[in-house]
Image (spheres, rainbow, N blue to C red):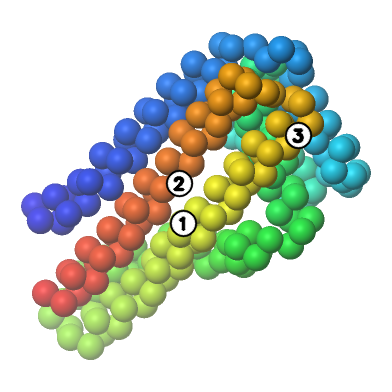
Amino acid sequence: MFSLLFLLPGMLLMLWAQFHVKGTYQKYAQVGSNMGMTGAQVAEKILREMGITNVSVEPIPGELTDHYDPSAKAVRLSEVVYDSTSLAAAAVAAHECGHVLQDVQGYKPMNIRAALVPAVGFGSNIGPILIMLGFGLGAMGGISTLFINIGILLFSCVVLFHIVTLPVEFDASNRALRLINDLGILQGEEHRGAKKVLNAAALTYVATALYSVLQLIQLLLSRRN
């Protein structure tokens, strides 16, 4: 019961953040921009104006699946963003281009996050298994403690990944807002709408990071008991 109550604030914040970002996105997905540029056109304009010619802009299935793939040098926009002329689409497309600029300029937090990806994949799958195995073998003393400690160490990589993600995402959003303003893509009330979309999205990363930290603290406390 204590474990559930300890994690409850993080769980509630995650649920609220997901609800908030979906509601904000849907609101501004219904508002067209004065320039009438699709998400794809916004991304292409930003990349062209920044002199970046080796990054493609591609559509992908799904909703809110937008991302920048640095290994493929591709900005991948969900189909609803790729073809939409809404404020939300422009904000999302510009945000992903912010990641492109981070990659081009060697933004350190982004490089750190990329370096953590292999450990995160391993830690998120194997870490919980070792922790549960360790608690299950509680009577075996040293062996169970070893499993728990290794599992917590692996899970710590996941937590670090979520923490490092925060400056990466906030910086990409700040770059996006400057770009859409400087290039005249969105201005005035449009710019404020785009900022609301990006701020709502940022809350999901904050909530995820907080929840992962609470999970780690809860594991450390459980190890001591």
The amino acid at mark 3 is Asp
Residue 198: x and y in percent read: 54, 34
Q: Residues within 10 Å of mark 1 (few under 14, many from 20)?
A: many
Write the residue at 56% across / 48% down. 169
Frontmost residue, 103 versus 148: 103
Q: Quadrant of residue 82?
A: top right
* Residue marked by disc 1: 162
Could you tell me how far apart the alpha carbons at marks 2 and 1 are, in whole angstroms? 7 Å
Under tag 2, what secondary structure?
helix
Under tag 3, what secondary structure?
helix
Give the mark count.
Answer: 3
Label 2 close to label 1 by CB (< 8 Å): yes
Label 3 close to label 1 by CB (< 8 Å): no
Could you tell me how far apart the alpha carbons at marks 3 and 1 are, in whole angstroms? 30 Å
* Residue marked by disc 3: 182
Q: Residues within 10 Å of mark 2 (few under 14, many from 20)?
A: many
The amino acid at mark 2 is Tyr
Under tag 1, what secondary structure?
helix
Could you tell me how far apart the alpha carbons at marks 2 and 3 are, in whole angstroms? 26 Å
Whether 167 is drawn above or below 85: the answer is below
Frontmost residue, 95 versus 59: 95
Instruction: Give the mark nearest the N terminus, 3 or 1.
Output: 1
Instruction: Give the mark nearest the N terminus, 2 or 1.
Output: 1
